[in-house]
Amino acid sequence: MTELRVEGVYVGKPSVLGVHGREEVLSGITKSPVSAAEIALGEINLAGDDQADRTVHGGVDKAVYAYPAEHYPAWVAEDFDVSVAGFGENVSTAGADEKTVRIGDVWAWGDALVQVSQPRTPCFKLAMKTGRKDITPAMIDSGRSGWYLRVLRTGTVPTNGVMALKERDENAPTIEETYLVSFGNPARFSAEHRDAFLQLAERVLGTPDLSPQYRDGLRAKVARFA
């Protein structure tokens, strides 16, 4: 796997998603397709895209959210009423998934360079958008998380075409392995599996290209089981 097909690009500005408690919830999770053949990619956003709260969404390590289009049939088969861009992704991809994409992968997209930084962790806004509280545990259990990209070099990117793999550390953890450490519960493991979990956790935490915010949260979790 040396190429990812770009099947579509989606952007959106924050809007009122609903009401949580007594307060309106702003979110940029609702995206619209980009009809132009190309779009500008800056350090923290595609042109026309934004996030409501950059303390937890967006920023340099989560500038672009990529999601495999191949996952949607599984969601539909599980009776979730979602379609492409339904998870708030910026780019719909084909040709790779969480089992094959690795933290630190560098992809050439048009004349920009992007790098895989972390998996997506679902939050309550996804449940609000879909109207399904059970979509959060479903994403965690299935591992169909997608991944975030940081921008190493800004540029103009095609809305259809390919991302070409430029750099990869074959020893870096995959998105699936990173997610396993994030949501696995070693307290329920046998001693053998607990040791394997902690070894994987050490490998994930030692990955230099993992986003710092994600690493900090992961380190706090792992410390409870070490």
Image (spheres, rainbow, N blue to C red):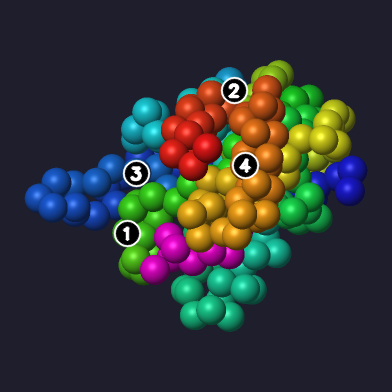
Mark 1 or mark 2: name the one nearer the start of the chain: 2
Compute the Cα span from label 1 to label 4: 34 Å
Q: Which mark is residue 42?
A: 2
Disc 3 marks which residue?
27
Q: In front of the other: label 2 or label 4?
A: 4
Q: Residue 203, how many percent across, how many down?
A: 69, 34
Q: For mark 4, what is the residue?
A: 198
Name the amino acid type tagged 3.
Ser
136 versus 200 height, above or below: below
Q: CA distance from mark 3 to mark 2?
A: 20 Å
Asked if labels 2 and 1 touch by Cβ distance under 8 angstroms, the answer is no
Question: Does 141 appear in magenta?
Answer: yes
Alpha-carbon neighbours of circle 3 within 10 Å: few (<14), some, or many (≥20)?
A: many
Q: Amino acid at mark 4?
A: Leu
Foreground: disc 1 or disc 2: 1
Residue 133, relative to residue 67: is it above or below? below
Element at label 4: helix
The residue at the point 40 percent across, 55 percent down is: 126
Mark 2 nearby-residue class (10 Å; few <14, some 14–19, many ≥20): some
- Could you tell which of marks 1 and 3 lies nearer the N-terminus? 3
Viewer-proximal residue among 9 and 168: 168
Kindly report the distance in space between the C-alpha atoms of the residues bearing marks 2 and 4. 37 Å
Q: Amino acid at mark 1?
A: Met
Please state the horizontal and vertical placement of residue 212, each as a whole percent of the image.
53, 24
| Magenta region | 134-144
Give the number of the mark in front: 1 or 4. Answer: 4
Q: Which residue is mark 1?
A: 128
